Each structure stands twice: as structure tokens, then as C-alpha cells.
Amino acid sequence: MAQATAASEKESRASRRFEKIQAIVEQYGAAESALIPILQKVQEEYRYLPEEILTFVATALNLPPATVYGVATFYAQFSLEPKGKYIVRVCDGTACHVRKNQTLISTVKEWLGLKEGQSTTEDMRYTLEIVSCIGACALAPAVVINGKVHGQMTPEKVTKALEELEAAEKAEDK
Amino acid sequence: MTPVTKLSSPQELAEVKQKTLSALETGCTRVLVCGGTGCMANGAPAVMEALQKALDERNVPVRVDLVDDSKEGTVRLGYSGCPGFCQVGPIVRILPSDYFYIKVTPEDAAEIVEKTVQKGEVVDRLLFTDNDGKTYAKRNELPFYRDQVNVVLADSGIIEPGDIRDYIAKDGYKAIAEALFGMTSEAVIAEVTQSGLRGRGGGGFPTGVKWGFTQRVQSPKKYVVCNADEGDPGAFMDESIMEGNPHALLEGMVIAGYAIGADEGYIYVRAEYPLAITRLRTAIAQAEAANLLGDNILGSPFSFHIHIKEGAGAFVCGEETALISSIEGKRGMPRPKPPFPANSGLWGKPTVVNNVETFANVPKIILNGAEWFRSFGVEKSTGTKVFALTGAVVNTGLIEVPMGTTLGDVVFKIGGGIRTGKGFKAVQIGGPSGGCLTTEHIDLPLDYDSLKAAGAMVGSGGLVVMDEDTCMVEVARYFMQFTQKESCGKCVLCREGTKQMLALLEKIVGGEGTLEDIELLEELAVAVRDGSLCGLGKTAPNPVLSTLKYFRDEYLAHVVDKKCPAGECKAFKGYRIIEEKCKGCSLCARKCPVGAISGEPKQPYTIDQETCIKCGVCFDVCRFGAVEK
Amino acid sequence: MPDEVTLTIDGKQITVPKGTLVIEAAKKLGIDIPVFCYHTKLEPVGACRQCLVKIEGFPKPQVSCSTQVAEGMVVHVNTPEVKQMWESMLEFLLINHPLDCPVCDRGGECPLQDNTFKYGPPDSRFEHEKRHFEKPVPLSSLVLLDRERCILCFRCVRFQREIADQPDIYVANRGYGDYIDIFPGKPFESNFSGNTIELCPVGALLSSLFRFRARPWEITKTESICPNCGVGCNITIDDRRRRYVVRFLARINDEVNEHWLCDRGRFNSHTINDPDRLVKPLVRKNGELQEATWEEALTVALEGMRAAGSHAGGIGSPARTNEANYLFQKFMRQVIGTNNVDYTFEKRTDGSTGALASAIASVFFNGRISDIAESDAILCLGSDISYDLPLLDLWIKKAVRKLGKNLVFAYPLKAELAKYARPFLSYHYGQEAEFTRELASAVSGTSWQPLAGVRMEDIDLASEVLKSANYVTVMVAKSMIESAENGRDVLKSLQWIADSLKSRNVRVQVMLLVQGANTFGAMDVGLLPGYLPGYKPADKGLTGWEMLEKAGSDISALWIMGQNPARDLFHTEAFTAALQKLDMLVVQDHILTETARYAHVVLPSSTFAETEGTFTNTERRIQRINPAIRRVGNSKADTDIIIEAASLAGADFNYSKVEEILTEISNTVPQYQGVTFDAIGPFGRYLGDLK
């Protein structure tokens, strides 16, 4: 009995999920040219592109799943792996690079406890991304934390910003 | 805000302009907070809020609209586009007095309102002060602006991008009216061709000629595409135009559409520019409501629609055929040309692809004429060019200068010379596709042909100034790392070539390089340049080739003497604390991002070389000169 | 000529049509330019950069695969500078390509290996670690991928996208991380996947059936024809030591299959190599099939058949050669003395066979495969072409997708081609006659009522599409005429459509879609009840279906050559029961089929891979098959079995060579006049337009 309930709950969750995707597809129209905006919206919703959703989008747009997969893996913005709740983007544009963003990267890695090759923390709270120019060159070096641009960063400032975010997150948890 | 509604003739457009101007003339004081990405990130929203509050507290009525017959307040508060001098943001500008306040904080709001808005006095402490202690009250007096010539950026920082009336007041959309009601499409193309305008995205192809090709192709459907995928790291001029004056771009595209016979346009914007996207969407909505975009523009038979497509993070989409693939929803991979987009572009239809700055120049050319445009710049590179000036100069930000301005003027007059007090070494121009210029190029005019002859390129206009502490091999490695990461992988030369060049450069900066590696690197660079499929690959070796040309001795020092002359490459350096000088203040230990420095307070500290990542923070922060490299 | 340009390559002048690629012009002059990504049938991508040449006036080298010729162009290929570039390009390609040629299936027939020998560097200057991938990755049960060997020429991806329009494989990731992939968990299940293996210029895509089975240099190649459907794709049979067929490859024939094969044909070599192939004749003794000598077996068979006389029947096969089928009907008619001959046991409606025979005899069916792409509109009736005749599916996709032609597709179910159709007409199954009459009425401008389930506006649209074309290809499934109720009316309507279009000055070609590799030939050579070779009327006989139906009553003995009714999809039980009622059942086949298990005599015959002869395909092109491997055990060719049986019966079947049978056919069947092995040549001879 309990199992049956769990199964039907899972099913209804799944169908709710696809309803949401269906709405996104309807918003942009079921054409190949809408694929990238749809994937962007899906990623906004889930923080990554789950495989079954790629299949769903392919069917909805009448595209071969392999084509959708090819597009999803081409663009840097898309992730097929789940990302953390908060994204920390360190800009690696020229201006930031010449103003020593490398120190910022190692500071963030250290603070998040990321190992070599790891970009998302184990608790799925944070993902570190090193991105090409975000166009805030005059504020170099820049770090985008949770969508907010922080300019003229130093290791102390970035640590402080992360600590504030963590504190807010903890307060929310309570 | 009252929207401008359906204008059905050029006369009605002129009326809106008149009304707006007379509204502005009724003694209205404008308080413009910079709304560029830089200032917004630097606290502009808080400043805006504080200004609003300060005005409310003093019961200063604030205007919502620029409509003359409304009985509104005397102050108009709003966000302007980026005035370019991002380094000193947040910037607040007061019109008509043109006071230029820098690094404004919310705490300054009350004083600005009391003194400047209410009494017309200047707040001295918020003015720009140069190294000699001289202050400058008005924008155009600032050394940063004094030598600039603003055509494309002329209205950025003066108008509010969120209000179409502001743009109309500056003769916005008048060029459309003139083209649609007074010129044939051939005449528009002739004017643009005459002006000598060349593609501002880097290639420098004559815009009018490109339009002419597309116009002559018979097709019931054509497209105008705006390349706003400004991917060069360190370049943000297109971003600034879209944020600061989005209507100029729209107007340029409509004129292009009229010229070539297209009724639909796409703006392909990097997703990394969310503010630009928002501003463009607002601008499109306002222009559509005003009948300056959409069906039967200004009551003419001509219709033109503009859509926005967001990029998804791929530098190669700046290449026009890749960009077209991406708009179509495909992988952004370039394809061989011909066929050129003029014949077979978006969805196989004739397509004109131009960059943001190019389009933004067009309305001015139509309004003022080709001859006027030719009065800026030099014979074969007419008009002005916007550069993003960054790096080791005193003043950084966006600058606009006539084509042909010398490198020296840009670096020393506008840029104010080297910030660090060290010597000027080089400029990297044109980003990862460009090359470097050195002290020998101080008098080189910055225009398409001179730069090409010197082995560099205008590119999209990134200008990074480097001082003596910058290692040119490392610069080449940085750009190669960028292009290697961004190669789409389609053609072998670029895919494998950039990877191998990067491997060789890493070997050299890592202290393992040999003379043969330098030879192989150069051979590879030539092969990749000559044989690659698209612009990305063809230009990827430029940083390598130009640094090899002008700084070969630095490469040699790395492989023969095993030294980095600039002292930048980590493999050749290590940090050490000089015991005698160390006061044991613990500052370096606190700043070290990896915890490599340890010691007891008041005792000399030591650096654990195993843990040290050679970032140099300790060297930078030590106030006693106790860290040596 | 304004549409031609003259250029110079390596000092030699050549005039080619405008728009020709430099590489194609060079090819015409016999100048070799190495390529990897370029393929004549695929859109150029300029990815491998191998084909760089020097063109005067261009500061940089140009890729000859995507540069079009221009008047007065001067191209240099054989210069030290160009050779140097080619060497560099090969060095690039080899940076990540493993040196595992000794264990690679492609070794010995690998373009990368060959070009490296010809133009490549002696050694590599790059010393870093090559890319590593898990390998090989199965993309499907048939296709394996070795990503380390892949040089990313994208031929496979392009083929699937441009030609097959089944893009199940794709490039994943970007830049240096690019690799070929499928969607996770969704295998590469295209009908044409095998072509990607053949297109692969390295050993990255591998056939799971061929992998590690043979080295290219120990393979013998034999030109032949695929026996699996009516298209008659040109193939080469690759065998090892004349004993073991290792694979089929496509043989280029631009009028039939271009460069391609379908997977069903390509991967169907296993029955030839079946370890249970029959090696000796079998005769039923005491209820058991026991090995016997040829003489013994044939004697028993003859006795049984002759005892039945006019109550005997013979069923040949649409997958056997013209020569075998011709001799078979001659043997049945002359030696056994029966009129009951047929090539099939399909159920046919009354009179349809006669109607079809006269239409064929009057050359109503004159359609050419290669003209599918020439015509402006294609009317396809009653066949799921993608399944029935897969290569024609590619021709239609090419016409519609690449050349922008119109397809009118009529079929009860939404088959694969429906999505390319404008319009797709889904008529009710069983109402073929009504439907075709409606279409014919619309085309001829006669009033009509919609009865067959297709909307009036769709029929009108179809009629408009056909009428507004300059050239129309009509393709009709034979089953629509022979199996459908009132199939004769279908044929009449078709003639009506063709006549109406012709009267509007629309050129029309009609193609009869048959499923067997030699269905057309079997009919042509007289293996038809009531018709002698060349559709000359003969005394009435029973059809194959009727023979089985009347087994035990009118029919007491049957000789079945190369068919297996006991495994028929729909009638297994009825057929099996019928076979058991016979006094004599002779089965001629290469394995002990379900039908053979009920036989009194089983005669081991050769497969097409051991046989010489001809097939006539769906467009009525006669093509040659040639023996690739030696006969298995004591098995014999169909023709030899019949000749031996005839001579045992004292008949005068004097043929010393297979070609003599063909000569006899060409003297008997008007359309085959003058056909000899030589006249057929390697690419076949089209007979559809001969009266």
C-alpha cells in the first residue's frame, strides 16, 4: 500500500514536471530555432539539464534526441550535471586576468573545499565556474555570486561575500 | 511613464521630439545615475534609492515624464547609459550643468540634492581629481574625455535608455523617417558606402558594399542580423551601447532592413549580458508601441520586426556563420564560405550580419551625411572607434576616438599613462584574435590597415595596456588558452593546432621549453593561421606570432636562460620572507589564500614552498618590503 | 558556353560546369588530392583541411573541397609547398590517432594510412599523451565506435543528417573535447547505419560482424547484386579464401544505389556462412530424411513429379536468377508437363495477374530510379518504401529535401515517408481501387465523391501538385494491383492518371515496385501461370496460392525452389497442413528450411554468393551476380540441378554455360533482346524503355 502510494506520488511528480516543461515549450514554440531558449529556461528551472527532460524536449520539438544532446553539450552555459544552489562565477576575461583573478579562484576553491577537478560542493550548495569575460572589465577582477556582480574583488572581499551568503542560507534553513 | 503611441507619420515623430525638448527646457534638472553594468554592480541602485529618498524628504517633485504639457516637478531622476569612465563609478551626472560626480555613495545623496539640485552648487569632494590635485567639475573637462570624440557614444550617459522620448529628443528615429520617406534603398546604401563605414566587429569589411551584395540578391525573404556576441575577453563596447543607447542599434537595423529589403531582424546577444538584454527588450517594446518598429513603420509601407536571441556561451558564435547556426538552434559551428550570408544566410536566406557598433553608426550617417562621417578618422578608416581600455593604465573604461588616433595618445593622454609607475611595455589590441604593439608603435595610427600591417588588428576593440611586469609569453599563453577552450572543434588545424600551441606555451612558461619548441610553435602558428576554416582559427595564432615578432628575446630567455624577464612566470620564481625585514605583523599570513605562511606574531614568518601557489599576494601586501621574489 | 568555366590545374586546362569544386575538376584531370572529410555525395564542410591547394591570387592556401572553380583560375597541386602543407596536415591528424594499425580492421584499406604513406611525415614532433577513451563503444548491435581513432571528419554525422535524415549520431561537446556520440541509452538505429562504417576514413566506426574477421589484404572482392529487395543495389562480396563471406560493401552505381546500402542488405551475409548449410541431397526413407546421392534424389523427385503430371506444380522464387527461373518453368512445362508454375505463393485477386502482365507487356512501367530525382513530383502509392525498398527511400528524401521536389505519398499507415509528403493521403486499407479512382478523377477533372477515407481537399492538393509538375514519377506497389480488391481497377486508374497528365503535357514515368530482387525477371521469363516467357499467353495454370490451396486434391506433387511457405508470416498453419497432403514435395534450398522438413526430397542448392546469373530489378534493370565463394559440399547451382534433372528425364537441356541460358532468354523475351553478360556490364542494363 505504502509502496503503491510512493509510486503514484513519484508518477504524479514526474507528470507535474513534464507539465512545466510542456509550458516552457509552448511559450517558445515547438521549432528547432527555439531549442536553445527552451534549454536555457529548463536549466534556469532545474539548474541543469536532466537527461529525461532532454528526451522530452526532443520529442516535443520533433528533433532527434542526439541533435538536442549535441546542442546541449556544445554551449558552455549548459550543464548535464546538477549544479549547486549558488553559482560563484569568477570572471577570466583579460582585464580580470591581468589583475590577478587566479588568487580569487584559489580563495574560492579553498573556501568551498573543492578538490582538483571538482566544481560543485558535495552538499550541492555551491558551484564554482570560471567564465570568459562578463563585460565588467572596469571592475576587474570581478566575481558573480548568486547572480550579483562584485567588482574589484580581493580574497578578503570574496570570502566575506561568501560568508554573508552562507549566513543568509543558514538563517533560511532555520 | 506615458508611452509614445502609434506614430503614423514623420510629422508626428517630430512633434514628440518638440514636446520632449520643450519639457526639458522648462528648467528641468536631470539627475542621471549611471546604469551600466559596472556602476550597477558598484552600488548604483543604492545611490538611486538614496537620491529618490533625499528628494522625497525635501519635497522636491520628481518628473515621471518628459511631456511638456504635464504639470510635473522640476527634477527628473533616472538611469543613464554608461558614460565610459567605469573605473570611478558609481557616476552621477547633473544636467544641464553637467557636473560629473564620481564614486558616489548613498551617503552623498542628501548633499547632492541640497547643494546641486536645489541650489545649483557643485559638491567639490565628489569631483574627479587628477594626480596633480586638480579637480574637474564638468564631464568634458576631464582629461579622460577631453581627447575623445563621441559619435556612437555621444548620447550614452545623457539619455535614459529606458525612455524612448529621450532618444527621440536627440533626433532619434529621425534617420528612419528620412530614409523611409526621402530615400530609395539604393540611396541609403550609396550613402553608407560613401561614408566609408567599415565593420566594427573586427574584420573591417565595408558595410555599404556588404549591404549592396545582399540587396542585389533576389529573394522574397531576407534577414538583418546583429552580432552582439561580444566574446573577446576585455571588450565591452557593444554591451555598453546596448545598455546605454539601445534605440540607436534598433534604428540602425531598421535602416539596414530597408536598404536590403528585409523585414525581420535578429539580435544575437551573449547571455552574459543580462542588463543589455533587458534594456533591449524594453526598447523594442517601446519602439513597437510607437510604430517605429513593426508593421508599416511611421505609416510607410515598410515593416520590420526585431527578435532577440540569447547566446549560450560559445565564443565561436561571434563568427557569422556559426552565429547563424546558433540562431537556427544548432551547434554554433562555422561553415565554409562561400556561400556568404549575403547569398545564403539565416535559414538559407540572404542575410546581412553586422555588429552593434556598426549599426549604431548608421543613423548618424543618414542624418548627417557621408561627408560628415568622413570628417572623422582617416582616408580608409573613417569615423570613430570605441575601445575598451584596460590593464595597467591610470584611467580605464570605454573610450571613443577618431580612427587613426595614435597609440600614444590613447595610452598616455586618455589613459593617463601607466598606473603602476613602471614603464610602458606593450598593448594587446583586438583580444585573442589580435596582436601586440610595443613602444615602437607609440606613433602608430589606430586604424584597420595600419594595425593589420603591424601584425595586430582592430578586432572588436579591446585594448589591454601592459607594463614591464607583464610577461609577453604568458600573455600569449593566456590568449591561446582562451581560443583553445573556445575552438569549436570542427577543423583539424584549429582543434589540434591550438591545443598543441597551448601545450608548447605551457611548456615554455613552465620552464621546460627548448629552442625547438619555439621553432615548432612558430611553424604551427603559421599553419593554423593559413589553413583554418574560420576567423577564430585563422586569427588564433596572432598573439603568438606578434609576441614572437616583438618579444622573441623573452621567449629565448625562458628557454635558454631559464628566466622570466618580467618576473611573472611562476616556474621561475618563488617568494621568500627576508627575516631581517619581517616585523611579524602576520598580514601576509592572513592574506595568503592557501595558508602557506606561518609564524608567531612579532617573529619573522616563513613561507611553506610546497603549499605556496606563487600568487604574490604576500609580496603585494607587505608594508616592509620583507617579501622578495 | 556561359555555364562552363575553364581553369588550369598544374598546367593542364580543363573546362567544367560552373559551380564545380576545384577538387572535382582535379579528379577529372586525374590529379590526386588527399581528403578525409570531403565526400562527393556529402555537402563540403572543410573540416579536415587536408585538401589544401594553392590558387593564384589567394594569399593563403585554399581548401579544394569547398572552393568553386572560376574562369581563368590557376591552381597548383603538385608543388613542394602544397606537399609540405599536406604533410603538416597529416602530422596534425596523427597527433591523437593511435598507432594500432596492426590490430585495426581498417589497416590495409585505410585512407589515413594510405595518405600517410603517400604524403605524410616520417615521424611526429609531438610527444604528448594521446587522447584516451573507453573503446570500442557499441553505438548499436551492429556499429561500434573507437573514439581514439576518430579524426572527426563528421562524414558519419553528415550522412545520417544529409542523406538518411536519421540523425541518431551527433557530435557531442566542443573543441578538443569533441567526440561522436549517441543520445545516452538510445542506440544508433538507422536503417542505413552501415554506410557510416564504409564512409569512415579511419578505423573508428566498425562493424560488429566484420570486426577481427579478416584483414583487407586477404579478402577477395566479387561484384554482385544484393538479393534482399527489388532495388538491386550493387555490392561487392568480400570473402576470405573463397570460402567465407566476410561482408558486403556498396558498389557505386549512380543510377541505382549511388554509394549506399541499407542495413538489411548489408548485414545479411550470415545465412551464406550458416554452419548448417545442406551439403548433400536428402531423401525421405521410412519417414526420415536421409542423405542420398544426387542421382538417387533426382530419380525419386522425377518419379514423383511425373506421376502427378498435370497435377504437379512448380513454385520458383523472386530471389533466384532469371536463368534459374527460366529453366525451372521450362522444366515444369516441358519435362513434367504441367501448366501450374508460379514464382510466388502470394494470394492474388482474379484477373489481376493478367492485367498486370498486359500492362508490363505494353511497357506501361517505364520508370527509372535515377529519374526520381529528376521529376518535379513523385506519386508513391501503396508501399512503405522505407521498409520495402529502403534505397528508394533515400532517392525520395534526396528529391524532396535536397532538390525541393514534391512527394505525394499514399499509404494506409503513417509510414516514415509521410512526413516528407505534401500531401500524405491515408486511404482506408481495402479501398485502394476507390482511392485511386478518386485521385484519377481529380487529376482528370471528373467529379467524384470521397469514399476511401481521404479528405477531398487533400486529394485536390495532390492533383494540383501532379498537374503543375513538368515531370511526374508514379511509383506503385505491385501488391496494390495484385492483392488489393479490384486491383485491376487500380491499374486502370493509374493509366487514367498517366493519360490525363500526358494530355496536359506532363511527362510521366511509372515504376512498378516489386519486393523481390528478381520479381520482375521471374515474371519476364515466364514463371507465371498462363504466360510463357515474354508474356505470351499459354494454357491456364494454377497460381502458387492455388497450388497450396488445392494440395491433396488437384495438386499432388510440388517442386519448390528457394521458398519457404511453411514460415509464411500470415498462413503458416494452412500452408503447413497443405504441404503435408502432398504425395511428393521437392524442396530446393541451401538450408533445411521449415518447408524442407516436410519434403520427400531435399536438393541442396547454392546461395546467390555462389551463383552466376542475372537479376532484373524493380526498374527493370538487368544486372549480373557472380560467384564469390566455392560451392558448399555437394550443393549445386539451381540451374545445374534443373539441367541434371531434365537430362535424367531424357530431355534435351543442353547448356554448358549459364550464359547460354541467358542467350535463350534474350531470344525468347522481346525486352531482353541482345542481352548478354558483356552487354549488361558492371552496372547493369536498363530494359524498361525497350519495346
Image (cartoon, coloured by chain):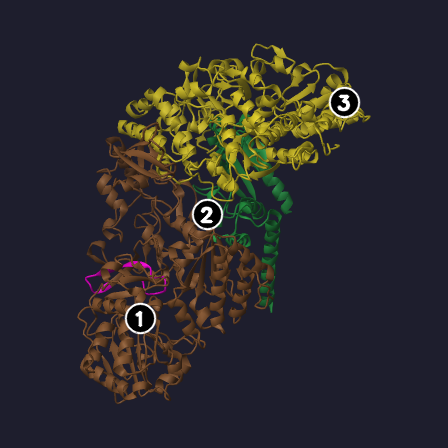
Chain colours: A green, B yellow, C brown
For the record, the magenta segment spans: C226-244
Q: Amino acid at mark 3?
A: Ala
Chain where mark 1 sits = C
- Residue A30, labelled with which disc? none
Element type where label 2 sits in the image: helix
Secondary structure of residue under mark 3: helix
Q: Which subunit holds the residue at mark 2?
A: A
> Mark on residue B23?
3
C-alpha separation, residue under disc 1 versus residue under disc 2: 53 Å
Q: Mark 3 touching mark 2, by CB under 8 A?
A: no
Residue C225, compared with residue B167, is above or below; it is below
Q: Residue furthest left?
A: C656
Q: Which residue is mark 1?
A: C525
Residue C688 image point, x, y percent:
35, 61
Q: Write down the chain letter for disc 3.
A: B
**Mark 1 belongs to which amino acid?**
Val
Report whether residue B272 is seen: yes
Amino acid tagged 2: Gly
Q: CA distance from mark 3 to mark 1?
A: 97 Å
Q: Quadrant of residue B170?
A: top right
In the image, C404 versus B226, the foreground residue is C404
Q: Badge 3: how crowded within 10 Å, few (<14), some, or many (20+)?
A: some
* Residue pointed to by mark 2: A70
Q: State the image coordinates of residue A11 (x, y, percent, origin top left).
A: 58, 61
Above or below residue B307? Residue C206 is: below
Q: From the viewer's perspective, is residue B608 above or below residue C502?
A: above
Q: Is residue B429 left or right of residue B38?
A: left
Q: Position of residue C128 (x, y in %)?
A: 30, 39
* Disc 2 residue crowd, few under 14, some 14–19, many 20+, Cα 10 Å: many
Please identify, in this view, whether the residue under mark 3 or under mark 1 is nearer the observer.
1
Whether discs 1 and 2 lie on one chain: the answer is: no
